[in-house]
Amino acid sequence: MSKKVAALVVAGSVGLAMMAGPADASRSDHERARRAVEAGEIMPLRSLLDTVENDYPGQVVEVELEHEDGQLVYEIKVLQASGQRLKLVLDARTGEVLKVKSK
């Protein structure tokens, strides 16, 4: 499953970068996220995905790192076996689940 998630994240990043503008913008976003992880400002995505996969069974279909209300959050979308879609918002620094929405 982790290879699928990684492929989806890479594919999504490439697609967003193409829509957003030059390739330099994508590199800049990636570098900013990498530096934030190295500085201890945010948790590595892999750590959070391990927790999400255990607590919210299903397939992770999308991951975004965003600013929300002055803090960095990971938005993670999960498709469960029942067909229900979950949108999880996690504090990127602590990994705490801030919101869970289902559709």
Image (cartoon, helix red, strand yellow):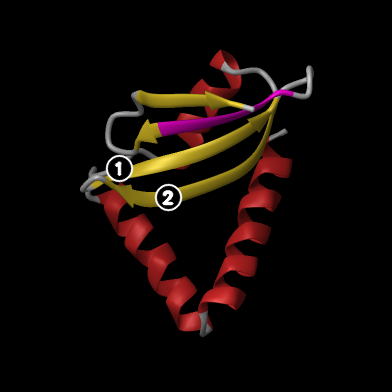
Instruction: Tell me which segment is drawn in magenta.
Output: 84-89
Residue 17, horizontal then vertical, whole percent: 55, 72
Disc 1 versus disc 2: distance between alpha carbons?
10 Å
Residue 94, horizontal then vertical, whole percent: 28, 29
**24 and 75: which one is in front?**
75
Q: Quadrant of the N terminus?
A: top right
Kindly state the secondary structure of the residue where label 2 is placed: strand
Label at residue 42: 1
Where, by quadrant of the figure, is residue 35 drawn? Answer: bottom left
Task: Check disc 2 and give the amino acid type.
Answer: Leu
What main secondary structure does the magenta stretch of the protein show?
A: strand
The vertical placement of 27 against 45, above or below, is below
Instruction: Identify the residue at horizontal 38%, vertical 51% (top origin).
Output: 66
Task: Check disc 1 and give the amino acid type.
Answer: Ile
**45 and 70: which one is in front?**
70
Numbered disc in front, either 1 or 2: 2
Tell me, yes or no, whether the two marked residues, 1 and 2, touch with CB atoms within 8 Å: yes
Q: Tag count in the figure?
A: 2
| Crowd band around label 1 with a 10 angstrom C-alpha radius: few (<14), some (14–19), many (20+) | many
The vertical placement of 13 against 81, above or below, is below
Residue 83, horizontal then vertical, whole percent: 78, 24
Q: Is residue 27 magenta?
A: no
The vertical placement of 46 against 56, above or below, is below
Where, by quadrant of the figure, is residue 54 drawn? Answer: top right
Residue 68 falls left or right of residue 62? left
The residue beneath circle 2 is 65
